[in-house]
Amino acid sequence: AGSYIQNTPRAKCIEKRRKNDLVFLPVGCTENHGIHANSGLDTFMVTQIVEAVRRYTAKQGREVNIALPPLNYGGHPYHHMGMPGTAIIPAETVQEMVIYTMLGLWNDGYRKIIVINNHGQLWMLESALHEFMKRFQLPGIFQVLDWHRAVREFFVPVDRPDSLETTFVLADDSETSAALLVLKEMSAMSFVQDAMA
């Protein structure tokens, strides 16, 4: 309770928004992340990240707001077609959901909307952001951010004992390690398979 706009009493949402009108809009998907992981990993990981930022900013006295993810399923690149455990939503549907979620947040007084993505649908989200701005021409600060691109230097192997052994790819050791940090109970490491063998 109190973490997301949707699970916070309206009066408290208004009070928080008056202090900080920045809202995070986390976006993930449902897709196969390997037999050891859950199919909601992208969504659960991105929500854990923004929840951590919310807790940090709350301690600083400038708590950010978080909206529930507008999608539980997401758009996918063509090479995900037919992948078991993956639900693919058309790009137009993804874009319209994001556009009208942003409009609803703007109408509620949030003037800084940052879409935090944790999935390979960046081009759809960027298109949605541009269409939102062209269609409604509203003042504000709007951004789409792939969190893993923002910290990509942490996903590159370096000459250090605790470094990753390979560069980040879907369902690999680096993504699994990040998931174990924030979603340990949703992982079953006894089922891990070495894809390099």
Image (cartoon, grey):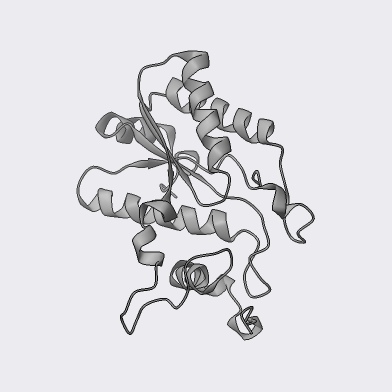
Nearer to the camera, 22 or 153: 153
Residue 9 appears left or right of 153: right
Residue at image point 76% right, 59% down = 83
Quarter holding residue 14: top left
Question: Please, is residue 147 above or below residue 97 in the view?
Answer: below
- Residue 147, image x and y in percent? 42, 51
Q: Quadrant where the C terminus lies?
A: bottom right
Question: Please, is residue 196 above or below residue 143 in the view?
Answer: below
- Residue 141, image x and y in percent? 34, 27
Residue at image point 42% right, 52% down = 149
Residue at image point 38% right, 28% down = 110
Residue at image point 43% right, 23% down = 106
Q: How many marks?
A: 0
Nearer to the camera, 21 or 141: 141
Residue 44 appears left or right of 90: left
- Residue 47, image x and y in percent? 47, 53
Question: Please, is residue 116 above or below residue 191 in the view?
Answer: above
